[in-house]
Amino acid sequence: MSRGRALLVIVVFLCLLGPEPVSVANRPRGEIVLCGDLVPSGLAQANATFQVFYQVETDSAGKVRRVTKLRNTILPDAPLVACLERWSLPVSDAKATVSFRWTHAQGWTQLSISMPGFPTRTVTIDPGWQ
């Protein structure tokens, strides 16, 4: 598997309790897959730093059922939407805001997820994964 096609799976552990006391056993388990090849090679080699923002809606099992672009003026939407549709989040029937940060000469460096009942979580991504 090439570096560009590498997948990094981050399992979202449900040790984060929301503001209401809800049993962890009753919450869906979350799984986030960061997909390679989202940035065209010409852009990856350019002097570009940018963020993209999407909203995802989950079904009763926490699986993403709908993806809406909030801000992305630089990348093709189809690969990002396809990647996000593979996610599941630890919230059911809810909306979450997701942002990805691309940093020049490093690649994807940050993923941030904001969803109801959880504090916003930002994950720093090791640039070597892609």
Image: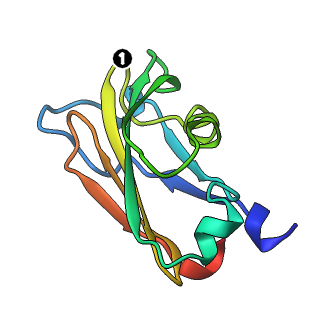
The residue that mark 1 highlights is 93
Q: Nearer the viewer, residue 55 or 39?
A: 39
Q: Is residue 64 left or right of residue 124?
A: right
What quarter of the picture does the N terminus occupy?
bottom right
Residue drawn at (38%, 22%), measured in percent from left and top? 92
Instruction: Please name whichever residue, 88 or 79, is drawn nearer the observer in this view of the structure.
Output: 79
Asked whether, in this view, residue 35 is left or right of residue 4, the answer is left
Q: Residue 103: image x %, image y %?
A: 44, 75
User: Front-most of 116 and 55?
Assistant: 55
**In this picture, is 30 found above or below 101?**
above
Residue for point 66% across, 68% down: 42
Q: Residue 50, percent across and down?
A: 39, 63
- Specify whether 3 is left or right of 60: right
The way the protein has been coloured in the rendering is rainbow
Which residue is rendered at x = 54% and y = 50% of the image?
75
**Quarter holding residue 49:** bottom left
Q: Position of residue 71 (x, y in %)?
A: 34, 42
Instruction: Check the image and report above or below for 112 versus 89.
Output: below
Q: Quadrant of residue 51?
A: bottom left
Q: Is residue 91 above or below residue 130?
A: above
Secondary element under disc 1, as helix, strand or loop, is: loop
Percent position (x, y) of residue 4? 75, 67
The total of numbered circles placed on residues is: 1
Which image quarter is the C terminus in? Answer: bottom right
- Three-letter code, disc 1: Asp
Mark 1 nearby-residue class (10 Å; few <14, some 14–19, many ≥20) = few
Question: Which residue in the rendered view is the most extreme toward the right?
Answer: 1
Q: Quadrant of residue 121?
A: bottom left
Q: Residue at x 62, y 41 (%)?
A: 83
